[in-house]
Image (spheres, rainbow, N blue to C red):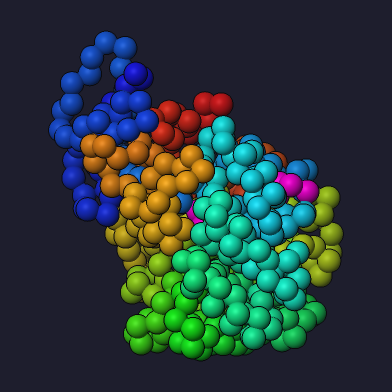
Amino acid sequence: MAEIVIQGGTVIDGGGVRRADVRVSGALIAEVGPNLSVGKGVTVLDAGGCLVAPGLVDLHTHLREPGREEAETVDSGTRAAALGGYTAVVAMPNTEPAIDNAGIAREVLDLGRGAVAEVAVAGAITVRREGERLAPMAELADLGVHLFTDDGSGVQDGALMRRALDYAKGLGVTLAQHCEDDALAAGGAMHEGAWSSRLGIPGVPAAAEEAMVARDIALVRLTGAPVHFLHLSTAGSVELVRRAKAEGLAVTAEAAPHHFALTDAEVAGYDPIFKVNPPLRTGADVEAVKVGLCDGTIDAIATDHAPHTPETKDVPFDEAPPGMLGLETALSVAFSELVAPTGDGSSGRLSAERVLGLFSWQPATIAALGPTDARGGGHSAQGGPVAPGGAANLLVFDPEASWQVDRAGLASRSHNTPYAGRTLRGRVRHTVLRGEPVVIDAEAQR
Ligand code: DOR
């Protein structure tokens, strides 16, 4: 059996932080401890000065297959994931056709089988994501689908959402809502505020998101079924979720890196790279998202990796599709924004351990991909712990390395990163999937 020793790092998982080497044998972790012996034929992965953690789990990846393979495929998207330190991604169902039945879900799961990151899928809540009739959630749940969402749109009809929650409760699955009231958001292309007025771009008010967050919290209270809130972007949304949690309601939430790293001021150059949905918000919203990450209101950082080809993105701001890449930059952006000492006096500072929890073991639990979840479809356990007998899905991250984002150097088929030319702090060095080093020294191995 192939053996690897990850040498000289600091191991971080949900159980804490310690200096240790990690021996991997086959697909499993065999030994964790100081100064492990290295026999003949053993591959050594240097982790000096690095953090060794369970692989990251992305709750929100647009892989675009089937239907938009010119923008991304399962193959290219999972390579981007592995380079970003992810060992599992949840593929969003707004493909063409949508993942709203077992046949399409099976197709995407099959494509993911030999990939360099595990691929789970989210199923649509409604048929074709049209918000009119419920999708066959039970047949999707039978395939092991745990998250359901019409992401790209929110479920507008409150009565239908209530019925979906009743079904979800019976099936033991979780609905993940893209919170956007279509009527309030209609015509908007960026956040509604001072910048949209100055630029003359129609705005989407914060209330378009907050109205649906508030409605769904009321529905969680009514039905007792859990809701996961996707890509929260406003101070008001964070506060609503904070209060719902204080009340003991079954809600979880995620934030995307761009919603704590970028503001609507980026739109000043009318570059459609900065168009995303929900839109980039104000500095006060960014600060509130950071505080939400720090105080536990927000449970996970999820990329909303949304590839779009240059042909579709290079059009006037109003006409461009929303979305930005995220997989290859997310952890570095988070370390730069949340861990790096900036001395700017802003709140919202986290330890490396907390950040890794937001990226790995907390999302693994939300997606039901963790070690105690029932395994199906060939998935291995995600989110750690880094302990003997555990699945060898691991990340080695150098928190001191800095690198400049080069659009052309990304593994994604699309190039719509908002961080091109920026220097980020911290870099993924190695990624190990089921005992196989799929990334070594920031290079994909296949
Ligand atoms: O910006 C976004 N892009 N937000 C979404 O909700 C959908 C996504 C996409 O699929 O491009």
Q: Nearer the viewer, residue 161 or 415?
A: 161
Q: Nearer the viewer, residue 10 or 394?
A: 394
Q: Is residue 125 above or below residue 54?
A: below
Return the residue found at the far top.
Answer: 40
Q: Nearer the viewer, residue 401 or 397?
A: 397
Magenta span: predominant SS is loop
Q: Which residue is found at the position 22% from the left and 18% from the top?
A: 38
> In this orientation, does residue 285 appear?
yes
Q: Is residue 121 above or below residue 32?
A: below
Residue 234 placement, left or right of 125:
left
The boundaries of the magenta stretch are: 58-67
Residue 41 placement, left or right of 265:
left
Q: Position of residue 246 (x, y in %)?
A: 34, 85
Q: Which residue is found at the position 60% from the left and 48% from the top?
A: 421
Residue 388 image-quadrant placement: top left
- Quarter that holds the C terminus: top right
Residue 80 placement, left or right of 372:
right
Q: Position of residue 31 (x, y in %)?
A: 21, 32
Q: Does the segment drawn in magenta span residue 17?
A: no
